[in-house]
Image (spheres, grey):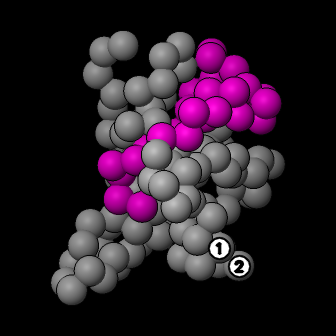
Amino acid sequence: MGTIPDIAPAEAWAAIQQDLAATRINVRADAGWNVVGCPDIAAAGKRVVLIPWLVDHSMAVNGHFTAQMQKAGVAPDHRVYFIGRSGARSLAAAQVEGYSPDVDVGFQGSVVREDHRGVTSGWKAAGPPWLQR
C-alpha cells in the first residue's frame, strides 16, 4: 500500500473543506465520541463518519470496518482522513486496502502530563471546530 502520510489537523481541516469527496472517519469507540468530543465538520457541509476500529469490550479489530465504510458512502477514490485519540488506531485503520488514506495526529494528541491530552497537540488543541455531546 505504501506510506501513509501523517497530516496536521489544520491541513486535514483545509482539505475536508476544499475537496468535496474528502471524508473524515473517527475510529474511536463510542465513549471517545460522546465523552471526549468529536471533530465538527458541519461548516464544510459534511458530518464525521463514526466507525470504531476496535470492538468495545473485546478490543478486537472491527471485522466489518470496510463494509461499514462502504455503507457510509466512502468510496475508494475519496480522500479519507482518519482520526483516533492519539493516532495509533487511525494509523491501523488507514491501512485498509483499496483506500487512499491520510492520518492526522489524533483528536487528543500526545500525553502532556499524567495522561492529560488535548492541550498541546491533536485536532482538539489545534483549533479546527469540534463539539462535545
Q: In this rendered view, identify the residue nearer to me: 8 or 76.
A: 76
The answer to whether residue 83 is seen in the rendering is: no
The quadrant of the picture occupied by the C terminus is: bottom right
Q: Amino acid at mark 2?
A: Arg
Classify 96 as above or below 111.
Answer: above
Question: Going 77% across and 35% down the picture, which residue do you hit?
Answer: 72
The quadrant of the rendering that contains the N terminus is: top left
Secondary element at image label 1: helix
Q: Position of residue 27 (x, y in %)?
A: 54, 49
Q: Which residues are magenta?
A: 61-90
Residue topped by disc 2:
133
Relative image position of residue 68 (x, y in whole percent): 71, 34
Task: Determine whether label 2 and label 1 are within 8 Å by CB.
Answer: yes
For label 2, count other residues whose C-alpha is less than 10 Å away and answer few (under 14), some (14-19) or many (20+): few
Question: In the rendered image, which residue does mark 1 sit on?
Answer: 34
Q: Based on the picture, tell me whether residue 50 belongs to the magenta stretch.
A: no
> Is 112 or 51 nearer to us in this picture?
51
Q: Is residue 45 visible?
A: yes
